[in-house]
Amino acid sequence: MRNKPAYGIESVDHALRLAVLLQREGPQRVTDVAERLGVARSTAHRLLAMLVYHDFAEQDSDRRYIAGPALRGTLPADAGHEHLRAAALPHLRTLVERSGETANLTVLLGDQVLFIATVECTHVLRVGDREGRTLPAHLTSGGKVLLARRPPAEIAAAYAGTAVDVPALQRALRQVRKQEFGVNNQATEAGVTAIGCAITDTAAVSLAMPTARYSRDRVPEWVALLRETAERIAGTL
């Protein structure tokens, strides 16, 4: 599984996370950045100044920081999920406390899912932070459950001409649609298994764990926690 490297340079880590934050979630003030990164305001200001210098950030008319020219060319069309993230985070933390595993919030963007929030568990062996990453929707637990809500004709059109086995995908999605949860058993990363449930037609919550701790006998328990969490997030929204 991909966790933070032991040799990571903290300032570089902060700068990269900040660039993703500006790109994915829109305008931020210095206090917002300090809170999200867990750094002092002075550190947040220095990081923003460096991103401005290299065209990764700029200030708008309200003196908030936004994605600069170097980032705007790759900005997703559906950026701006800060409201969903804010609503979900308290419930993700509760889910982690009750399940003992890492929780993720994802949204569907075309044939990809974007991880917009992660709350890590406290196990030494755990799935790490995936915030800001994108993965193929048809392989991820959250992506499967969201694709299962799409009409079969839409799925066929979306994956026509790709390397994806569309008939096999349609069969898998019928099962996901029936059971109302999706499983990704090492399809995107060796040693990582995840279970996901839909919150809305475009957002999902999932639990990710080392495959060594995954057990089919516990799936009903995890799915019950995920469904409750999804309902609570939807209620908050």
Image (spheres, rainbow, N blue to C red):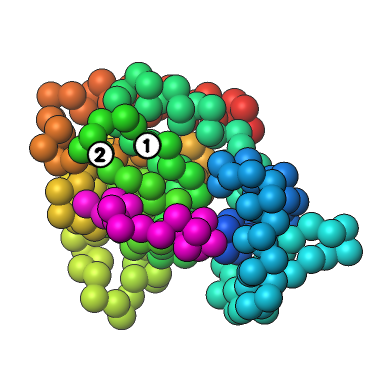
Q: Earlier in the sequence, mark 1 or mark 2?
A: 1
Residue 137 in the image: above or below residue 194: below
Report the side of 77 relative to 123 (left or right): right
Q: What stretch is highlighted in magenta?
A: 1-17
Residue 77, position as x, y percentages in the image: 61, 67
* Label 2 sits on residue: 126
- The location of residue 18, given as percent across then percent down, is 57, 58
Is the C-beta separation of discs 1 and 2 under 8 Å?
A: yes
Quadrant of the rendered structure where residue 211 is?
top left
Q: What residue type is labelled 1?
A: Glu
For marks 1 and 2, give the CA distance.
8 Å
Asked whether 97 or 223 is in front, the reply is 97
Looking at the image, which is closer to me, 67 or 50? 50
Q: Residue at x 62, y 61 (%)?
A: 47
Q: In which quarter of the image is the C terminus?
A: top right
Q: Quadrant of residue 198?
A: top left
The mark total stands at 2
Position of residue 29 in the picture relative to residue 9 (left or right)? right
The answer to whether residue 151 is visible is no
Residue hosting label 1: 120
From the top left corner, tell me how far across and down residue 133 is, in percent.
41, 59
What residue is drawn where x is 46% and y is 31%?
Answer: 92
Nearer to the camera, 175 or 95: 95
Q: In this view, does 95 lie above or below 206?
A: above
